[in-house]
Amino acid sequence: MTTDDGARFRPERLAVAEASDAADGWRFLTVDNLAPNGHADALRYEKALDAFDRAAGDLECRHRGRRHGLTFGIRGDDAEQRIAWLRTRLEELRPPTLPGHGTWDIRDGAR
């Protein structure tokens, strides 16, 4: 398989992986453009992590950080409701959009 072939099939593999996780009871929320830049952003980032801890409670959970974002995952019977609560809380924490800068991009799913 060439590099081009691999790039073409990557989205398909990601979709299959996410469907498999969903079948296993996982629900995900991804936040991009979350790179802290200064004290206020660092505090906001910590509050996002605290909100995730509160949302997950005693359910199985995981999160994965990337350079400018985080993906939160919760597994269990009421994971969907907990992810919805987390989304609401993160929307409240989202910084304002400034000219020339973005703000958090919050979306359902892991990818």
Image: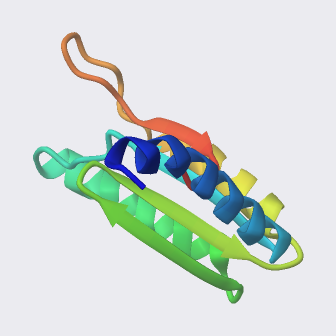
At a point 27% along the width and 48% down the height, the residue shown is 68
Residue 107 position (above or below residue 102):
below
User: For residue 77, which quarter of the picture?
Assistant: bottom right
Q: Residue 96: horizontal and vertical position, in percent?
A: 35, 25
- Counting labels gives 0
Q: Residue at x 74, y 52 (%)?
A: 84
Q: Which residue is painted at 58% across and 55% down in the image?
A: 14
Left or right: 102 with respect to 49?
left
Q: Quadrant of the N terminus?
A: bottom left
Q: In the image shown, does 87 or 93 lie closer to the viewer? A: 87
Residue 41 visible in the current orientation: yes
Q: Does 14 sit left or right of 41 as displayed?
A: right
* Residue that protrudes farthest toward the top in the picture: 99
Identity of the residue furthest to the left in this view: 38
Q: Is 110 or 41 nearer to us in this picture?
A: 110
The residue positioned farthest toward the right in the image shown: 77
Image position, residue 7 (x, y; %)? 42, 44
71 to 11, vertically: above or below: below
